[in-house]
Image (cartoon, coloured by chain):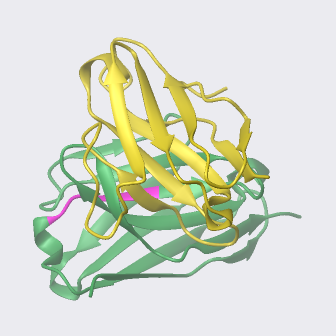
Chain colours: A yellow, B green
């Protein structure tokens, strides 16, 4: 059971928008920055969002991140078939002194 | 170009040991804290260990504490994970990863598969 809770799957049609939630507590999301990663099949994870809402160089602005209290959200607009992947949230947990990941959300672009 | 290349994975019996290595290039290795993260086949990501650039600060997941040891050699731009008393549940792909402060991972290796089976 993951410390951070994500929905197992989400789906939407090409061109549409989807959001992926990540729920935690005051010891992790509530008081630390959150990051989001995309993992395409058979590849290593890739950083999409860091410090709650910043995008690394090369990540299109179709990807956005936000945080409110002990929850965070990844948004993806203009969905493309190439966005089909697993998405993970991650942060530091101050009580556990550990990096924690969500269980992952599989995005299907119908 | 930042590159992280893991090696040392393989098949080992329960109770056995294995040492993973990660060769880093394209950045000043000693300036960065590093992580090991693993992923069980078909499952999610699990953080394993963190090591600061100077090896001053070390953190381990409870699941590997006392069995795994993370270390680095900044002169060789290398990160290591010594895994002892391996269990079947340690079977996973192990990723070497660079930390973007305060708590993100901006670069990942390609992963090294460790299989613990009799």
Q: How many marks?
A: 0
In-front residue for pair A16/A31: A16
Q: Position of residue A85 (x, y in %)?
A: 65, 57
Q: Position of residue A40 (x, y in %)?
A: 63, 65
B19 shown above or below B104? below
Q: Position of residue B112 (x, y in %)?
A: 59, 75
Kindly identify the residue that appears in the image at 27 percent across and 44 percent down: B103
Any part of residue A27 in sight: yes
Q: Position of residue B14 (x, y in %)?
A: 77, 58
Kindly identify the residue that appears in the image at 78 percent across and 55 percent down: B42
Image quarter for residue B84?
bottom right
Q: Which residues are magenta?
A: B32-36
A35 shown above or below B112? above
Q: Magenta span: helix, strand or loop, mainly?
A: strand
B101 shown above or below A70? below
Q: Is residue B95 left or right of residue B58?
A: right
Kindly identify the residue that appears in the image at 89 percent across and 64 percent down: B118
Image quarter for residue A3?
top right
Give the quarter of the figure containing the N terminus of chain A.
top right
Kindly identify the residue that appears in the image at 22 percent across and 87 percent down: B26
Q: Is residue A54 left or right of residue B39?
A: left
In-front residue for pair B93/B102: B102
Q: Residue furthest right?
A: B118
Any part of residue B65 in sight: no
In-front residue for pair B108/A94: B108
Please say whether residue A62 is one of the residues in the magenta stretch: no
Q: Is residue B30 left or right of residue B42?
A: left
B72 shown above or below A102? below
In-front residue for pair B70/B108: B108
């Amino acid at each position: 059971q993951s410390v951070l809770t994500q929905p197992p799957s989400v789906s939407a049609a090409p061109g549409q928008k989807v959001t992926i939630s990540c729920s935690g507590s005051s010891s992790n999301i509530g008081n630390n920055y959150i990051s989001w990663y995309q993992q395409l099949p058979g590849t290593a994870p890739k950083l999409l969002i860091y410090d709650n809402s910043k995008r690394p160089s090369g990540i299109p602005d179709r990807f956005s991140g936000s945080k409110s209290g002990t929850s965070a959200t990844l948004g993806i607009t203009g969905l493309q078939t190439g966005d089909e992947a697993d998405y993970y949230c991650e942060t530091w947990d101050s009580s556990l002194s550990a990096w924690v990941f969500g269980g992952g959300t599989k995005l299907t672009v119908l | 170009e930042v590159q992280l290349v893991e090696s040392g994975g393989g098949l080992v019996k329960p109770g056995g040991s294995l040492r993973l290595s990660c060769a880093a290039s394209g950045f000043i290795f000693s300036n960065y804290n590093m992580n090991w993260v693993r992923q069980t086949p078909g499952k999610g990501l699990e953080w394993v260990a963190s090591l600061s650039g100077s090896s001053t600060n070390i953190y381990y997941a409870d699941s590997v504490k006392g069995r795994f040891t993370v270390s680095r050699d900044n002169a060789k731009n290398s990160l290591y994970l010594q895994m002892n008393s391996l269990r079947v549940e340690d079977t996973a792909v192990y990723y070497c990863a660079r930390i973007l402060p305060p708590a993100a991972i901006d670069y990942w290796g390609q992963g090294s598969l460790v299989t613990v089976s009799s």
